[in-house]
Image (cartoon, rainbow, N blue to C red):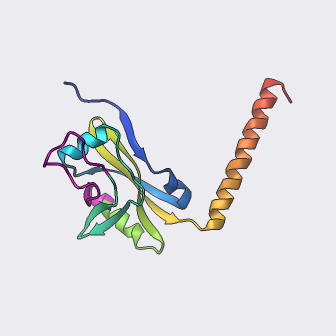
Amino acid sequence: MPREQGRKVVASNRKAYHDYTILDTYEAGMVLTGTEVKSLRAGRSSLVDAFGHENDGEIYLHGMHIPEYTQGTWTNHEPRRVRKLLLHREEIHKMLGKLRDDGVTLVPLSVFFHNGYAKVEIGVAKGKKSYDKRQDMASRDAQKEINRAMGRRAKGMD
């Protein structure tokens, strides 16, 4: 059977873009068991409350929820277990250098399949203050209004 081609998104963390300013992103593989992969292929996963953490020079993903596979038996996995991320050593060193700053953390942005392999997009992020969030929402609303006006003008309605 041929391997899947392209990118299929399983879960995304849209709240991360609201709560954090993403400084840099990395694509990492995950160490998974068979039932975890089957559950992900069924499109079941949640990144709410998930975060990345460094331990002994390795990066681990905590709090990611992959529900048990429904057709699984006693070999089923634990839904919220800690999962190791597969990154190049240079990427880990760059990431750890950025994490030494205050208020910087690792946040998973999305889980997807790329050419048949389960991957996670992880971002080095800095938390936003409430006034930053309001400012972002105001600028987004202003941009939408500008686009609407341009669309009406292009159609000759204005």
Residue at point 62% right, 66% down? 130
Asked if residue 146 lies left or right of residue 124, the reply is: right
Residue at point 81% right, 30% down? 153
Residue at point 22% right, 50% down? 32
The outermost residue toward the left is 74
Residue 24, picture quadrant: bottom left
Picture layout, residue 95 above or below residue 146: below
Main SS of the magenta segment?
A: loop
Magenta stretch bounds: 66-91
Q: Nearer the viewer, residue 2 or 95?
A: 2
Q: Position of residue 146 (x, y in %)?
A: 76, 41
Picture layout, residue 152 above or below residue 68: above
Residue 25, picture quadrant: bottom left
Q: Is residue 81 magenta?
A: yes
Asked if residue 26 lies left or right of residue 58, the reply is: right
The outermost residue toward the right is 158
Q: Position of residue 139 (x, y in %)?
A: 70, 52
Q: Is residue 131 magenta?
A: no
Asked if residue 113 lies left or right of residue 20, the reply is: left
Asked if residue 22 lies left or right of residue 39, the reply is: right
Residue at point 56% right, 65% down? 128
